[in-house]
Protein backbone atom coordinates (compact mmCIF):
# COMPACT_ATOMS: atom_id res chain seq x y z
CA UNK A 1 0.00 0.00 0.00
CA UNK A 2 1.79 3.05 -1.13
CA UNK A 3 0.24 6.42 -1.25
CA UNK A 4 1.19 9.95 -2.08
CA UNK A 5 1.33 9.82 -5.84
CA UNK A 6 -0.56 13.08 -5.98
CA UNK A 7 1.03 14.22 -9.16
CA UNK A 8 -1.94 14.74 -11.37
CA UNK A 9 -4.65 16.70 -9.71
CA UNK A 10 -7.62 15.49 -11.65
CA UNK A 11 -7.87 11.94 -10.50
CA UNK A 12 -10.63 11.61 -8.01
CA UNK A 13 -13.94 9.81 -7.64
CA UNK A 14 -13.70 6.60 -9.65
CA UNK A 15 -12.28 4.65 -6.79
CA UNK A 16 -8.74 5.55 -7.72
CA UNK A 17 -7.00 3.17 -5.36
CA UNK A 18 -8.85 0.22 -6.71
CA UNK A 19 -8.32 1.19 -10.31
CA UNK A 20 -4.67 1.83 -9.74
CA UNK A 21 -4.12 -1.50 -8.10
CA UNK A 22 -5.40 -3.34 -11.14
CA UNK A 23 -4.20 -1.03 -13.85
CA UNK A 24 -1.08 -1.72 -15.83
CA UNK A 25 -1.02 1.78 -17.22
CA UNK A 26 -0.97 3.30 -13.75
CA UNK A 27 1.99 1.14 -12.90
CA UNK A 28 3.74 1.69 -16.17
CA UNK A 29 7.11 3.46 -15.97
CA UNK A 30 6.24 5.49 -19.04
CA UNK A 31 2.78 6.31 -17.88
CA UNK A 32 3.14 10.05 -18.34
CA UNK A 33 4.39 9.71 -21.88
CA UNK A 34 1.58 7.35 -22.71
CA UNK A 35 -1.02 9.69 -21.30
CA UNK A 36 0.42 12.72 -23.02
CA UNK A 37 0.56 11.01 -26.35
CA UNK A 38 -2.94 9.67 -25.98
CA UNK A 39 -4.30 13.09 -25.13
CA UNK A 40 -2.53 14.34 -28.23
CA UNK A 41 -4.67 11.90 -30.21
CA UNK A 42 -2.11 9.18 -30.45
CA UNK A 43 -3.68 6.03 -31.74
CA UNK A 44 -4.94 3.88 -28.89
CA UNK A 45 -4.10 0.52 -30.42
CA UNK A 46 -0.63 1.60 -31.42
CA UNK A 47 0.13 3.10 -28.04
CA UNK A 48 -1.09 -0.02 -26.29
CA UNK A 49 1.00 -2.23 -28.50
CA UNK A 50 4.13 -0.14 -28.17
CA UNK A 51 3.96 -0.27 -24.42
CA UNK A 52 2.90 -3.84 -23.96
CA UNK A 53 -0.60 -2.96 -22.84
CA UNK A 54 -4.00 -4.06 -23.96
CA UNK A 55 -6.17 -1.64 -25.82
CA UNK A 56 -9.02 -2.20 -23.40
CA UNK A 57 -6.74 -1.63 -20.47
CA UNK A 58 -5.59 1.64 -21.90
CA UNK A 59 -9.17 2.70 -22.52
CA UNK A 60 -10.15 1.77 -19.00
CA UNK A 61 -7.31 3.82 -17.65
CA UNK A 62 -8.24 6.83 -19.74
CA UNK A 63 -11.84 6.58 -18.60
CA UNK A 64 -10.93 6.20 -14.97
CA UNK A 65 -8.68 9.24 -15.10
CA UNK A 66 -11.05 11.35 -17.16
CA UNK A 67 -8.61 11.71 -19.98
CA UNK A 68 -11.31 11.60 -22.62
CA UNK A 69 -12.40 15.10 -21.72
CA UNK A 70 -8.86 16.33 -22.01
CA UNK A 71 -8.45 14.64 -25.30
CA UNK A 72 -11.60 16.14 -26.66
CA UNK A 73 -10.55 19.57 -25.54
CA UNK A 74 -7.31 19.06 -27.37
CA UNK A 75 -8.90 19.66 -30.71
CA UNK A 76 -5.99 21.55 -32.18
CA UNK A 77 -3.89 18.45 -31.92
CA UNK A 78 -6.53 16.37 -33.60
CA UNK A 79 -6.81 18.81 -36.44
CA UNK A 80 -3.05 18.93 -36.84
CA UNK A 81 -3.04 15.20 -37.19
CA UNK A 82 -5.81 15.27 -39.68
CA UNK A 83 -4.05 17.90 -41.75
CA UNK A 84 -0.81 15.92 -41.59
CA UNK A 85 -2.59 12.78 -42.66
CA UNK A 86 -4.19 14.46 -45.57
CA UNK A 87 -1.30 13.48 -47.78
CA UNK A 88 -1.15 9.84 -46.91
CA UNK A 89 -4.72 8.92 -46.18
CA UNK A 90 -7.76 9.40 -48.24
CA UNK A 91 -9.54 12.27 -46.64
CA UNK A 92 -12.12 14.22 -48.47
CA UNK A 93 -10.87 17.55 -49.67
CA UNK A 94 -13.64 19.50 -48.07
CA UNK A 95 -12.99 17.87 -44.71
CA UNK A 96 -9.38 18.95 -44.86
CA UNK A 97 -10.27 22.47 -45.82
CA UNK A 98 -12.74 22.54 -42.97
CA UNK A 99 -10.09 21.28 -40.63
CA UNK A 100 -7.58 23.89 -41.71
CA UNK A 101 -10.09 26.65 -41.37
CA UNK A 102 -11.22 25.31 -38.05
CA UNK A 103 -7.63 25.05 -36.91
CA UNK A 104 -7.08 28.68 -37.71
CA UNK A 105 -10.00 29.61 -35.52
CA UNK A 106 -9.31 27.47 -32.51
CA UNK A 107 -7.33 28.93 -29.69
CA UNK A 108 -4.91 27.09 -27.47
CA UNK A 109 -7.69 26.03 -25.14
CA UNK A 110 -9.50 24.30 -27.91
CA UNK A 111 -12.17 26.93 -28.10
CA UNK A 112 -13.71 27.92 -31.33
CA UNK A 113 -13.11 31.63 -31.34
CA UNK A 114 -15.35 32.72 -34.13
CA UNK A 115 -18.67 31.02 -33.69
CA UNK A 116 -20.44 30.81 -36.94
CA UNK A 117 -24.17 30.71 -36.64
CA UNK A 118 -23.90 29.37 -33.15
CA UNK A 119 -21.99 26.28 -34.15
CA UNK A 120 -19.44 25.53 -31.53
CA UNK A 121 -16.86 23.03 -32.65
CA UNK A 122 -16.31 21.89 -29.11
CA UNK A 123 -19.93 20.94 -28.84
CA UNK A 124 -19.69 19.03 -32.06
CA UNK A 125 -16.76 17.10 -30.73
CA UNK A 126 -18.66 16.48 -27.54
CA UNK A 127 -21.44 14.98 -29.57
CA UNK A 128 -19.17 12.56 -31.33
CA UNK A 129 -19.36 9.02 -30.09
CA UNK A 130 -16.32 7.10 -28.93
CA UNK A 131 -16.16 5.30 -32.24
CA UNK A 132 -16.44 8.47 -34.22
CA UNK A 133 -13.67 10.07 -32.21
CA UNK A 134 -11.52 7.01 -32.65
CA UNK A 135 -11.86 6.93 -36.39
CA UNK A 136 -11.28 10.65 -36.52
CA UNK A 137 -8.07 10.25 -34.59
CA UNK A 138 -7.03 7.26 -36.63
CA UNK A 139 -7.48 8.51 -40.14
CA UNK A 140 -9.25 11.81 -40.01
CA UNK A 141 -12.66 10.48 -40.90
CA UNK A 142 -15.34 12.80 -39.70
CA UNK A 143 -18.89 11.63 -39.27
CA UNK A 144 -21.15 12.87 -42.02
CA UNK A 145 -23.32 14.91 -39.75
CA UNK A 146 -20.20 16.66 -38.48
CA UNK A 147 -18.70 17.60 -41.81
CA UNK A 148 -21.98 18.73 -43.16
CA UNK A 149 -22.52 20.99 -40.18
CA UNK A 150 -19.03 22.41 -40.14
CA UNK A 151 -18.76 22.46 -43.88
CA UNK A 152 -21.95 24.39 -44.19
CA UNK A 153 -20.94 27.06 -41.76
CA UNK A 154 -17.19 27.27 -41.97
CA UNK A 155 -16.98 28.15 -45.61
CA UNK A 156 -18.25 31.63 -45.86
CA UNK A 157 -17.09 32.23 -49.34
CA UNK A 158 -16.49 28.78 -50.64
CA UNK A 159 -18.20 27.78 -53.81
CA UNK A 160 -19.90 24.45 -53.66
CA UNK A 161 -17.81 22.97 -56.37
CA UNK A 162 -17.96 19.27 -55.89
CA UNK A 163 -20.86 18.27 -53.81
CA UNK A 164 -22.79 15.23 -54.61
ZN1 LIG B 1 -4.78 3.35 -14.66
Image (cartoon, rainbow, N blue to C red):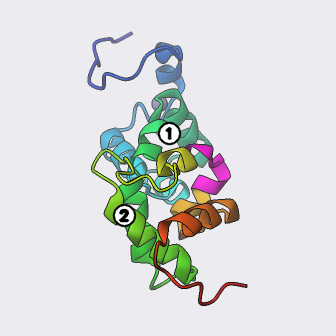
Q: Name the spot of residue 160 as percent of width and height, x first.
A: 59, 84
Residue 142 seen by the camera: no
Q: Name the spot of residue 27 as percent of width and height, x first.
A: 40, 31
Residue 131 seen by the camera: yes
For residue 30, above or below residue 43: above
First in residue order: circle 2 vs circle 1: 1
Front-lying residue, 32 or 133: 133
33 left or right, relative to 156: left
Q: Name the spot of residue 24 as percent of width and height, x first.
A: 48, 35
Residue at horizontal 31%, vertical 44%? 109
Residue at horizontal 53%, vertical 15%? 18
Residue at horizontal 36%, vertical 57%? 76
Image quarter hosting the N terminus: top left
Q: Which residue is mark 1?
A: 68
Give the SS element for disc 1: helix
Residue 152 inside the magenta-drawn segment: no
Q: What span is in magenta?
A: 126-133
Disc 1 residue crowd, few under 14, some 14–19, many 20+, Cα 10 Å = some
Disc 2 residue crowd, few under 14, some 14–19, many 20+, Cα 10 Å = some
Q: Most prominent secondary structure in the magenta stretch?
A: helix
Q: Which residue is mark 2?
A: 103
For residue 113, above or below residue 84: above
Residue 130 inside the magenta-drawn segment: yes
Amino acid sequence: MRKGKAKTAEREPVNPGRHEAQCLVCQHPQREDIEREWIDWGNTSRLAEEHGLSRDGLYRHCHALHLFKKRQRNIRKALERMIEHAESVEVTASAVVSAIQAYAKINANGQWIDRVEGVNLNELFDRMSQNELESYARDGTLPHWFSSLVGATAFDSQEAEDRD
